[in-house]
Amino acid sequence: MINIVLSASVLPWVFFFGKILFIFTLGFGVIAPVMIWVERRVAAFVQDRVGPNRVGPLGLLQSLADGIKLLLKEDLRPDEVRPFFFILAPALAAVPAAMAFAVVPFGPETTLGGLLAEPARLQIAPLNVGLLYVLAIGSLAVYSIALAGWASNNKFSVMGSLRASAQMISYELAMGMAVVAVILMSGSVDLYDIVKAQTNHWFIFTIPGFIAFLIFVPAMFAETNRTPFDLPEAEAELVVGFHTEYSGMKFGLFFLAEYVNMTTLSAMCVLFFFGGWEFLPFGLTWEGIGYQVDQHWFSWVIPFAWFAAKVAFFLFVFVWVRWTLPRFRYDQLMGLGWKTLVPIGIANIALVAGLITFGGGF
Amino acid sequence: MTTTVPFAYWLILSFGVFCFGACGFLIRKNALSLLICLELMLSAVNMAFITFARMHMSEGGNILYFLVITVAACESAVGLALMINYFRLKQNIRLDDARALAG
Amino acid sequence: MLTSDYLGVFVLLALEVVTGVGALGASYFLGARRQSPRKTSPYECGIPSEGAENQRFSVKFYLVAVSFILFDIEAVFLIPWALSYQDFVHSSHGVYAFVMGMIFLGVLTLGLVYEWRKGLLDWNK
Amino acid sequence: MPDLHHILFFSFAAIILFSAGMVAFRPRPVESAMWLILNFFVTAGLYVLLGSHFTAVIQVLVYAGAIMVLFVFVILLLNLDPRELGTEGGASWSSLVLFMGFLSFVLVALQLATPDLLKAPAALPEASTFGSVEAASRELLTKYIWGFQLSGIILLLALIGVGLIAYRKAKAPQVKGAHA
């Protein structure tokens, strides 16, 4: 069986589907459940209690138990609900966030230790319009929330979904401005080249890069409706916001979509500002410190683990912020989006352009 | 790797979509569906632009596509603003009631 | 094959839609089924719902959506400019690209200032 | 000669025409908006087949991602019931005849005018940068700079226009309903 798999003609397809299955199982099967467990444990730690530790060692299987419970709950459908859109919204909730993963380069170019003919990229889809694809798919996340609120025909959920989508599109604009600054600095739209452009100095250590990072982080929190921007789901005012009428697995899918969205945005943040899978800035890339990325077929795992560690750090920041910062009022929230982040984004673009033309480099 | 489908089929497809948009535009009674059919017609026109761009291998088609999209967005934004005003005055968006030109 | 780049995107999309629909289908068949009138009425913390069902909302949301579209397209216009900016600088046309970008950004900020002064952005009544 | 491109083209074309038909003839605006989003997606796939990747991404980013968000927002906002939507004309026979007339006219015109349109197109030269983002942006900044600047001004005018038309100070009666 092995020599069939390794024969030259089949290997590229094995490599191709291997990447897809790897990212898909990682994204849906590993990261989301583990993140739910991490969130509950960190919340417990912050509030000085223990958190889930009954199911499995240290409570690790708790999210699996929750998943099965959600599957077995009744598929309740309230009357005078628009049936088709009521089911379509949760089914498509996680799709945009997970689709953006198709372009994320999770490792260096490698020939799998000589197995492949020429070095192939560790990306599912090596599109040269990478960043535009990410922005395009990111702008589709609004539909599932807007449809969910409208389809469940309940005053609270319509109000919650309107507020959540209005907040998401405002912060999507701020994120667009930060992304334009990153494109200016790296001079390319392909995510692979953006990481390559950061070999000798990560964008976080440049002045305009730091400003773009300051814009990107609040936009990240607002895109995933996380605290301090989760007013549309605030338990006190709007019941639970747009997924009030959802229960059972439909609510589970919305819950899963939130975590997949968080992972995608953390991966983007690492790629734009923290040099993706490269080891350290100032030339200390993996080749720089003498680690042969291409020696064995499994040698790409170390850079990937380093990239995953950075993404894990940002996921921890998501959870950490949730249990420390208070919630914004809605007009403060929209005011911050429109009146502070967008103007700073425009000024930052002008700053980068000026630095490149006259300052000879940022 | 190029498309091996003759360009005539692309033009017929874009014209078919345009015909659907035009018919929808003529049939519809409410302003909202009217604007949606308008967007469909504009998308069909864009399809023709890109076919011609690919036929003559010139980038101009893609740029013009980009400009048509901007105008389509501005047009739908202003169209919906007018529709909301119309809705405020007459509490419905039935086009049959829009008879008095006095506005 | 250029379209093979998008094959990966297509397969990932198919996988996700299958999981989404599969999970919903599984819960439809596995889940218990006990419908009761109280259960299927719209959820309002247990009290029977009152008030008009389809309410209208303030036009502020529409204005946010419109300014989002118009600024989003301006951001999309900035992307090609940002992309070819470094090529212009290397071919010593840096000042030309800078001036063109600043004119566009000026028009964009004009729009933002107009919205700010007119009060379209502040949210409280 | 069923090679991959023909299969892909005809399947995409079938979906596009079907969804365009649904957009035109479905009575409720929500359904036609959803069918239009599907139409825009498959058109983006068509542009990939044609080789212009820049337009495919812009189609998804601007059409399906921004303009349709505005339409879905307005549909959500107004929350119309059929009484206010107006009785639907529906797909009456006159529209079908109109449609067939348009289509047949074009088929004849295409046949007579340019027979070489029906031949298989020339191959894309290997190193050609047609349709790539870099080529489009370089062209936009050099040859079509007027289009670039005028679009900025058009967007500004649309913004001011919408500000004048739709926005009333708080004193005027809002669209009736709760203050969100």
Image (cartoon, coloured by chain):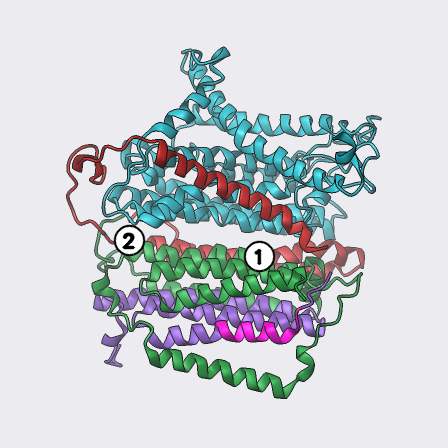
Chain colours: A cyan, B purple, C red, D green
Q: Nearer the viewer, residue A9 or A125?
A: A9
- Which quadrant of the figure has residue B87? bottom left
Q: Position of residue A242 (x, y in %)?
A: 34, 41
Residue at (71%, 67%) from the top-left corner? D142
**The N terminus of chain D, quarter of image:** bottom right
Q: Residue furthest bottom?
A: D112
Q: Position of residue D26 (x, y in %)?
A: 35, 65
Q: Position of residue C18 (x, y in %)?
A: 49, 42
* Magenta segment, prevailing SS (helix, strand or loop): helix
Answer whether residue B7 is magenta in the image. Answer: yes
- Residue C12 in view here: yes
Residue at (48%, 13%) from the top-left corner? A56
Q: Which secondary structure lies at badge 2?
A: loop
- Which quadrant of the figure has residue A297? top right
Vertical arrangement, residue A16 with respect to residue D128, above or below:
above
Residue at (58%, 43%) from the top-left corner? C12
- Residue D52 in view here: no
**Side of A73 relative to B89 (left or right):** right
Answer whether residue A312 is magenta in the image. Answer: no
Distance Cα–Cα, label 1 vs label 2: 29 Å
Q: Which residue is mark 2?
A: C58
Q: Nearer the viewer, residue C23 or A140?
A: C23
Vertical arrangement, residue A331 with respect to residue D157, above or below:
above
- Which quadrant of the figure has residue A77? top left
**Side of D87 relative to A258 (left or right):** left
* Type of the residue with mark 1: Val
Read off the magenta span: B5-17
Q: Which mark is residue D71?
A: none
Q: Which mark is residue C76?
A: 1
Q: Position of residue A231 (x, y in %)?
A: 36, 36
Residue at (49%, 21%) from the top-left corner? A38
